[in-house]
Image (tube, grey):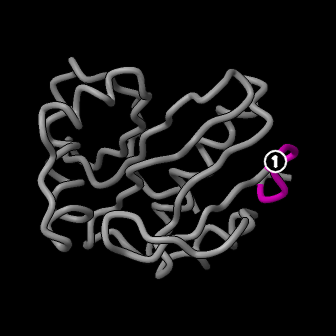
Amino acid sequence: MSPPVDLFWIELEDFRFQEWVALRQVLLRDPIGLIYSEADLEAEREERHLIAEDSGKIVGGLAVKVLTPERWKIRQFAVAASEQGRGLGAFLMQHAMSVAEEESVREIVLHSREAVVSFYEKLGFATVGEPFEEVGLPHRRMEITLPFNSLA
C-alpha cells in the first residue's frame, strides 16, 4: 500500500524539523515523561530524517543514524495516531530500506519497543539477543541484512 503522502529527507535547519520533533514528542516522549533537550536535538544533526507529509502536515517519519557506509540504525520511528493501521509505517520503512539498498547499505539495526516487535518482523527484521530496557521501557534489538526480503 502506498498512502497518499509525500516523503522528504530533511535536516535540522529545515522549516519542518520542529514540527517533526513535536510529533515525536507527543508520540514517543510524552507517554514516558521525557522531553527533548537542545543537546538531544543537536546530537541528531548528523542523522537523516525521513518525514511523511499529508496536505502539508507531518504525519510520520523516522531518523537514520549512519553508523558506517554499510550499516544504518533506524531511530525515532513515529506515525501519527490518526494514521496508524493504514500502512504508513510500512510505507516509510520500505522507502528507507529502498534508499539503503540504493546506497549499498548491508545492514539496518534498530531498538524496537517490545510492543511493536511484530511490526518490524513483518518487514523482515529479526530479534537479536535478550530483551533490554531503554527509556524505561522493554526493548528488543532487531536487524535485517541485504538482500531485504520484504522488498524482493
| Viewer-nearest residue: 57 or 26 | 26
Please provide percent x and percent y for residue 42: 23, 26
> Quarter of the image holding residue 129?
bottom right
* Residue 74, horizontal then vertical, whole percent: 52, 46
Q: Please tell me whether residue 10 is drawn above or below residue 5 in the rendered image.
A: above
Which corner quadrant holds the N terminus? bottom right
| Residue designated by label 1 | 145
Q: Nearer the viewer, residue 80 or 86?
A: 80
Q: Would residue 96 appear left or right of 82 to someone viewing this image?
A: right
Residue 111 in picture, x, y percent from top left: 53, 59
The residue drawn where x is 44% and y is 71% is 133
Which residue range is magenta in the image?
Answer: 145-150
Residue 121 is one of the magenta-drawn residues: no
Looking at the picture, how far across and down is residue 81, in whole percent? 26, 72
Q: Name the residue at 46% across, 58% down.
A: 3
Q: Which sits in the foreground, 74 or 61?
A: 74
Looking at the rendering, which quadrant does residue 103 occupy? Answer: top right
Residue 35 left/right relative to 123: left
Q: Is residue 50 above or below residue 140?
A: above
In the depicted structure, whether residue 8 falls above or below residue 61 = above
Above or below 145: residue 150: below
Label 1: element kind: strand
> Callout 1 environment at 10 Å: few (<14), some (14 to 19), or many (20+)?
some
Mark 1: which amino acid? Answer: Thr
Q: Nearer the viewer, residue 2 or 30?
A: 30
| Residue at 52 percent of width and 65 percent of height | 112
- Residue name at image x 64 percent, y 49 percent: 109
